Amino acid sequence: MESQSVINILLILSAAIAVIIISKQIKIPAVIGFILTGLIWSIFAPQNTESTSRLQDFGDIGIVFLLFLVGLDFSPEKVRRLGRIMFVGGGVQAALTVAVAALIALLGIISFTTAIIGAFVIIQSSTAIALKVYHDRGELNSPHAETSIGISLFQDISAVLLLLFIPLLSAGSGHHSSPPLGSLAVNILILSAITFSAYFLFPLILRLVVTSGIRELVILLALVFCIGFSILTQRLGFSMALGAFICGIMLNRSEYHSQIIADFAPFRDVFLSIFFISIGLGFDWHFTVSHIGMILGLTVAVYLLKTIILFISSRTCGFPFRTSLLVGAGLGNIGEFGFIVMLAALPFGLLTKVEFQTLGAISIISMLSTPLVILVVSKFTLRVPSLLKEARKSRKKGHDGNAPRIVIIGFGLAGRHLAHTLKSSSISYSVIEANGREVTQALANNEPIMFGDAARWETLERSGIERAQIMVVLISDPGAIKSCIGIARRINPKITIICRTRRMNEIEHLLKAGANEVISEEFETSIELFTVVLNHFHVPRNIIRAQTKLLRSDGYEMLRVPSPVKGVSDKLIQILAAGTTDVFQVMSDHFSQGKTLKSLDLRKITGATVITVVKSDKNITNPPPDLIIDSGDSLVIVGSHAQIESTFDYLENGPVDAEKNV
């Protein structure tokens, strides 16, 4: 490699750093930042074929590592958890997309082979962009985020399967670079035999290497497996990415696959970043500018078509209008796997250069548009009146005659626990849940639940919100929470609204939206840790209760300020310095068991005093020095917090850990 090529690559990567920093500030996903780097460089910088080619080579390695990690992470547990969304939602999307492509081919607009390749390119979505937007909006645990992940898993599988069949499609089309069908059949048999053998051998070899205790050997061996199997599949006439995915699947059986994922992630991130830069560099902006009308029209058509198809597939899985539309908006682009399919099809002549450039331009523009589309669609679904009457699908149970006292929005773990508590206390309630599968299971258990989107006026009305006393919101979509609060407040101005949020910066917004109480998971975790620490120092429970009440007051105001209030920390220091009383229960394996108070000599060793001993139901106040301490006795001890802590250690473990704290 010439020095000028190295300098060009260095400059491009340096430019990428600057673009990513800017992207971070304006909350644009890093993937888009890398593509923009390549685009900007291809437009304004002088072209250097060698450096661009080197970057594309590095990008190819990124694809190999990406597919390898996808295979490694393709666990049976994930398939079981997302199986219905994955196979039903993803299957419906694939079937409808192929059907539309086949119809276009039948009309004679494009060839059948091009239609198939184009369909599988369009099926792919950039989940990384959608999930980054969901993360920034605090929606990673929302139904539309989980649905997007499930459907994207099927998209990954469809891309990998097409990589296997591209040589067959090429052979069927009679392209001059296509291998004979007989040769392909032999190669498939060879690949199958090697894969079957490696499926058992790879984990065994990896286990032997791990026993050596040399961590670097595990990384090197996994690297050899990944690249070696990729080269093997390439020699057999298939894609290197296919080999990497198969290798990942084989190593997925190993108990060390999680460590391999962690070790490979940095390699994947670096080379995949270069891959996205190379996509931008390969963007023919002259072609795009000269055909801008056609490309923009096709981009809008593809995004709209994908959104409609994904909306249908999500509805098929039982999700409500808003969730389904957000899934379509987030996955309406053509993602990185689409480029993998295009790059694999191009050498076999299954796509012309014009078709490649057209699909590539549509892909890049659609990915760049995704954050804006999600924002617009999210606001649209919250502000526009209901287009579909979700309430028609709802089933009301338990509150037809009498309105529930409490309406629960969301029937996840927290919702189920709350419902169980209310049922045990004979307090009437109703539940709204947007996950059809959860609704079906809950109805089987005679829960008063209805299917629907709580961000819709009709759904809340049918739940009995008008006469309910309390609404508890336990969903993860901040936008839907605000909408739900606003609608509930308009329907029933006197209702008490309690909601949960995972993000501290949402507290003030939700309180302004009309919530009476906002429970922050992040702050509640901090308070729980605070409580455990104070318990460890034997701070009296009434003091702990007072402190936690203070921390929770005014929407966690004390925790939300940049620095803690000095008075609280000073007060806590005073409490810890003061005396207190605590109870120690003697167990059979404790040092103090079977000893007298005189032999323990607590006052001399730790500075604390035993004022009462409880034996069974008998309280012995001012116990005599010769009183023997037995297993099961409770000792009431007086002293400072430090003295009591030292006494507990001494009574349990003996004099090794105890020291006087006077």
Image: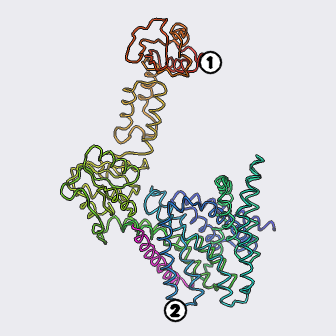
At which x and y percent is residue 618? 38, 14
At which x and y percent is residue 593? 53, 17
Q: Residues within 10 Å of mark 1 (few under 14, many from 20)?
A: few
At which x and y percent is residue 20? 59, 60
Relative to 660, is 244 above or below?
A: below
Q: Name the one closer to the observer, 190 or 452.
A: 190
- Label 2, label 1: how far apart the Cα atoms are: 87 Å
At which x and y percent is residue 299? 50, 79
Residue type, numbered disc 1: Val
| Callout in the foreground (2, 1) | 1
Looking at the rendered structure, the secondary structure element under dot 2 is helix
Looking at the rendered structure, the secondary structure element under dot 1 is loop
Relative to 184, is 195 above or below?
A: above
Relative to 82, is 192 above or below?
A: below
Q: How is the image coloured?
A: rainbow
Relative to 129, is 289 above or below?
A: below
Residue type, numbered disc 2: Leu
The count of marks equals 2
Q: Which is nearer the N-term, disc 2 or disc 1?
A: 2
> Quadrant of the rendered structure where residue 173 is?
bottom right
Q: Which residue is mark 1?
A: 656
Q: Residue at x 53, y 92 (%)?
A: 109
Q: Residues within 10 Å of mark 2 (few under 14, many from 20)?
A: few
Q: Is residue 82 left or right of residue 53?
A: left
Query: For the magenta stretch, what is the residue range?
Result: 290-318
> Quadrant of the rendered structure where residue 233 is?
bottom right
Q: Residue at x 77, y 52 (%)?
A: 209
In the rendered image, the residue lying farthest to the right is: 2
Q: Quarter of the image containing the N terminus?
A: bottom right
Q: Which residue is mark 2?
A: 106
